[in-house]
Image (cartoon, helix red, strand yellow):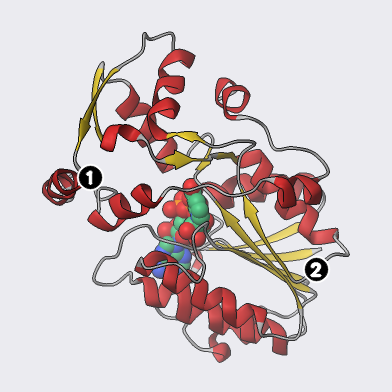
Amino acid sequence: MNILLTGASGFIGRHLTRKLQSNGHTVIACSRKNGFDFTKMRSKEDWMPHLNHVDIIINCVGIIYETREQTFNALHYQTPSALFRAGADAKVKRIIQISALGADEHSSAPYHITKKAADDVLRSLPLNWFILRPSLVYGHGGKSTAFFKRLARFPVILLMEGGLQPVQPVHINDLTDCILRCLVSTDTNITIDVVGAHALFFKDWLQLIRTSENRPEAHIISIPFKFCLIIAWLLKPFIPLMQTENIRMLRRGNFSDVTPLAEFLGHLPVDITTGWSKL
Ligand SMILES: NC(=O)c1ccc[n+]([C@@H]2O[C@H](COP(=O)([O-])OP(=O)(O)OC[C@H]3O[C@@H](n4cnc5c(N)ncnc54)[C@H](OP(=O)(O)O)[C@@H]3O)[C@@H](O)[C@H]2O)c1
């Protein structure tokens, strides 16, 4: 099938491109390098000329923090909505949207609110759609994977409220397998939370990373939420990932029921200990 893949140059996009191509699909890779800038393609008409002979659209564009040019509204909502509407007009066979766990009616973070707004546009269109909401995705080349590996190297780690936030990281292979399944599934128009086999506390994930690198357990120092916000605000110019909003999202936790994903895949996703040991 001919698959238009936005965000093809990103962490998920690169893994997905390899998997799609090795399964015999033709990938039309979109990123700013080859002229697809989401800040400049906000209308349906911008996308229509690119959809001739396209069977499937997969949207993998996203940002974790805003800049003056790169806003959540443009990248998560306006342009994906235009792309989805163009896809409906061009009668593509199905559209797969990579949203995010937490993009639901309870979301309060702009990151999630704008993702949900685009998800809702897709849900309203007369075509076959899939909305995948991954939790933290880990694997080779992932920015957060690299960040958590660096963090886990410190023998003493300061963590918000002792790192007692539940997280349920999912291996990149389980996410790309799930996307592959969306291409052929007869069960369509569904939203799936793409999570790992089980949840664990953030502090235990960091300890697990240390164990996998043959390091002894780190000493965890618990710091209050408000103090964490101040640290994040101070570090933001040096580590853009340290946005106060991201700290709030981590505090909310990042987990869900794995059963719908396991049923869709036909097996449980890999557990974090096994998945991480293969990195
Ligand atoms: N990784 C995770 O843990 C995770 C978890 C949940 C959800 N997600 C979602 O999954 C999607 C992909 O995540 P990722 O980890 O692969 O992110 P990533 O590595 O940061 O890749 C982001 C992609 O977005 C593209 N992009 C950024 N700004 C753009 C613009 N103005 N115009 C066109 N393309 C633009 C980038 O292409 P350029 O080469 O043009 O920069 C890149 O291909 C995102 O929507 C993210 O929210 C990721």
Circle 1 crowding by C-alpha within 10 Å: few under 14, some 14–19, many from 20: few
* Residue placed most toward the observer, 206 or 225: 225
Circle 2 crowding by C-alpha within 10 Å: few under 14, some 14–19, many from 20: some
Residue that label 1 marks = 239
Asked whether residue 10 is in view, the answer is no
Earlier residue among tags 2 and 1:
2
The quarter of the picture where residue 266 lies is top right
Indicate left or right for 42 with 54 as reference. Answer: left
Q: Is residue 253 above or below residue 197?
A: below
Residue at horizontal 43%, vertical 67%? Answer: 107
Percent x, y of residue 139: 54, 35
Q: Is residue 71 above or below residue 203?
A: below
* Residue placed most toward the observer, 147 or 217: 217
Q: Is residue 42 above or below residue 190?
A: below
Percent x, y of residue 77: 47, 77
The residue type indicated by label 1 comes to Ile
Residue at horizontal 72%, vertical 47%? Answer: 259
